[in-house]
Image (cartoon, rainbow, N blue to C red):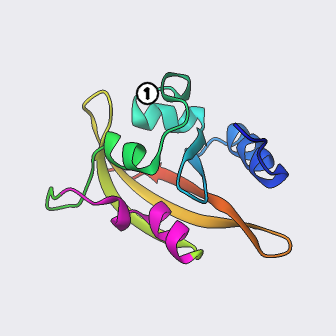
Amino acid sequence: MPAQPLELILGRQFIDTISLPAFLVDTEGNLLFYNESAETVFGLKFGETGGMRVEEWATIFTPYNEKGELISPEGLPLVQTLQTKKPTSGSFFIKNMQGRDEHIQVTAFPIIARPDRFLGAMAIFWTLDE
């Protein structure tokens, strides 16, 4: 695997030190890292998954809307940010790897280095109490 740009290395370090669940992907949507707080929500440790392609991570946690309808990868804020290179936010439900339903609010934003190099995106999210 080629060396990552410094901005992505620093992004991983940043989300590893915050208490909010967070997720980091490259420009293709490949999962680079999610933190310990995200592990709790997902019901799966990053060490058990490692990197994943967008087609895997966007479906493994089974995202769905308030009507119980599955959400395609293109409907997720992080994928929308990758496509538009603009911040995106939304809320939806996931069924985690422990079979638990979680209602989450997600804010995703692009990682753009100088001079205007698009490197990927980060999503920070939290559970919503019912």
Residue 114 seen by the camera: yes
Q: In this view, does 101 lie to the left or right of 69?
A: right
Looking at the figure, which quarter contains the N terminus? top right
Examine the structure image and report whether residue 65 is included in the region drawn in magenta.
no
Rendering coords of residue 68 (x, y %): 15, 55
Q: Give the overall secondary structure of the magenta segment.
A: helix
Across the whole image, how many numbered discs are drawn on residues?
1
Rendering coords of residue 80 (x, y %): 46, 70
SS at circle 1: loop
Rendering coords of residue 43 (x, y %): 40, 29
Q: Is residue 63 left or right of residue 9?
A: left
Three-letter amino acid code at the position of disc 1:
Leu
User: What residue lies at 46% left-to-right and 63% top-to-bottom?
Assistant: 79
Examine the structure image and report whether residue 82 is included in the region drawn in magenta.
yes
Check the image and report above or below for 16 versus 76: above
Q: What crowding class fits label 1: few (fewer than 14 Cα within 10 Å), some (14-19), or many (20 or more)? A: some
Name the quadrant containing residue 60: top left
Name the quadrant containing residue 115: bottom right
User: What residue lies at 54% left-to-right and 67% top-to-bottom?
Assistant: 82
Check the image and report above or below for 36 versus 73: above
Q: Which of 7 and 102 is in front in this view?
A: 7
Identify residue for label 1. Answer: 44
Residue 61 seen by the camera: no
Among all residues in the image, which is located at the extreme top?
48
Rendering coords of residue 53 (x, y %): 47, 45
Q: In this view, does 79 lie to the left or right of 60?
A: right
Q: Nearer the viewer, residue 76 or 15?
A: 76
User: What residue lies at 55% left-to-right and 36% top-to-bottom?
Assistant: 51
Residue segment shown in magenta: 70-84
Among all residues in the image, which is located at the extreme front?
2
